[in-house]
Amino acid sequence: MSHVLIIAEAGVNHNGSVEIAKRMVDEAVEAGVDIIKFQTFNSEKLVSKSAKQAEYQKRNIKDSGSDSQLEMLKKLELSDADHKELIDYCDRKHIKFFSTAFDLGSIDYLHSLNLGLWKIPSGEITNYPYLKKIAEFSEPVILSTGMCEMEDISAAMKVLCDNGLTKDKISLLHCNTEYPTPFSDVNLLAMNELKDKFGVRVGYSDHTKGIEVPIAAVALGAEIIEKHFTLDRDMEGPDHKASLEPDELKAMVSAIRNIELALGDGHKSVSESERKNMAIARKSIVAASNIKQGELFTSDNLTVKRPGDGISPMRWDEVLGKKAKRDFMEDELIEI
């Protein structure tokens, strides 16, 4: 199997602090992920003054005194200076910086940073101007499909392909946009439907608690895994509760890399590690009792025992009825 791209979604779990964001970069490097992803947005261009927080956001920001999305998001923006400081820090730490744009101006801004890759979040999959603008750059796109019916995804794919993208540059992530996602709503097998229907690379963006589901997704063929993480789930903020802590992120990456190796090439054959055990574990045709030269081999005087370095029991019918060419002692390997 090819290398699974693991994206550690820092999102807004930095709480607006570059220092916290840098600590998250450190933890992502320690965990061994490929990419750390943030979010780029201008609050006023993203939400209206009347937009309310989602239920999960209200649960996770209990003492804010307001249910305004705008007020919440204003505290979580990263400035131009913040972006450049984080990009420089990621370069020094040898990890790829990445971010998702949530408005048209932020798309232009990220394009100026030459990141070379786009992540379209589930909430933008019905945003025609947004999709068209990103497609026109003709750069690889990862598209999350939370809250989608198949026709929503088909429509988004059409916009992307009609405006400059070829299918080989598009990856689809199966996703459920609830934080955290109940296991009963994951529907992980739908990831395979996306691959069969659209013929593109697929992966999984996970919002469940724990690490089991993304690991299972890799076993099912996911080539990209995205997972939110935080320094501490008890921190104040909208996404911390549905995020992994650093030790969990590290465990997830380790498990995915093991699954990657375990999947192999799909062809059943004897592995080098087990080859040495074949003679020990398999059996041969041996004498069940002392056999005299010239005596016929029968099911009474033959049996099957370890080791397997003699005549295979699969040749049993071939051996029966032949004459012994010499004397055989009990348990001695038969020769014909």
Image (cartoon, rainbow, N blue to C red):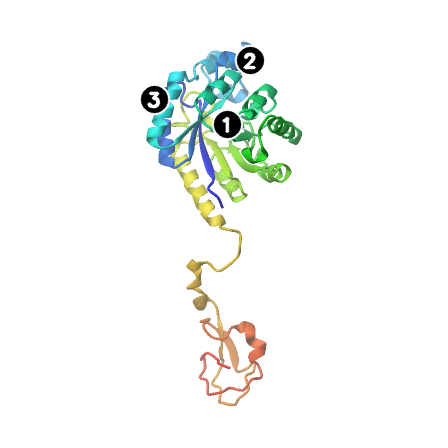
- Where is residue 294 shown, x and y percent of the image? 52, 90
Q: Residues within 10 Å of mark 3 (few under 14, many from 20)?
A: few
Residue where numbered disc 2 is placed: 51
Dot placed on the residue nearer the N-terminal end, 3 or 2: 3
Q: CA distance from mark 3 to mark 2?
A: 29 Å
User: Is residue 320 depicted above or below 182 in this figure?
Assistant: below
Q: Are marks 1 and 3 in contact (CB under 8 Å)?
A: no
Q: Secondary structure at mark 3?
A: helix
Q: CA distance from mark 1 to mark 3?
A: 25 Å
* Residue at left offset 44%, top offset 60%: 274
Which numbered dot is residue 19? Answer: 3
The type of residue carrying mark 1 is Trp
Q: Secondary structure at mark 1?
A: strand
* Front label number (1 vs 3): 1
User: Is residue 322 depicted above or below 3 in this figure?
Assistant: below
Total number of numbered labels? 3
The type of residue carrying mark 3 is Glu
Which quarter of the picture shows residue 169? top right
- Where is residue 32 shown, x and y percent of the image? 39, 37
- Where is residue 112 shown, x and y percent of the image? 45, 20
Residue where numbered disc 1 is placed: 118
Task: Report whether 272 appears left or right of 168.
Answer: left
- Where is residue 188 shown, x and y percent of the image? 57, 38
The type of residue carrying mark 2 is Ala
Q: Is residue 67 visible?
A: no
* Front label number (1 vs 2): 1
Q: Residues within 10 Å of mark 1 (few under 14, many from 20)?
A: many
The extreme right residue here reads: 151
Which numbered dot is residue 102? Answer: none
Q: Are marks 1 and 2 in contact (CB under 8 Å)?
A: no
Q: Secondary structure at mark 2?
A: loop
Q: Is residue 47 visible?
A: yes
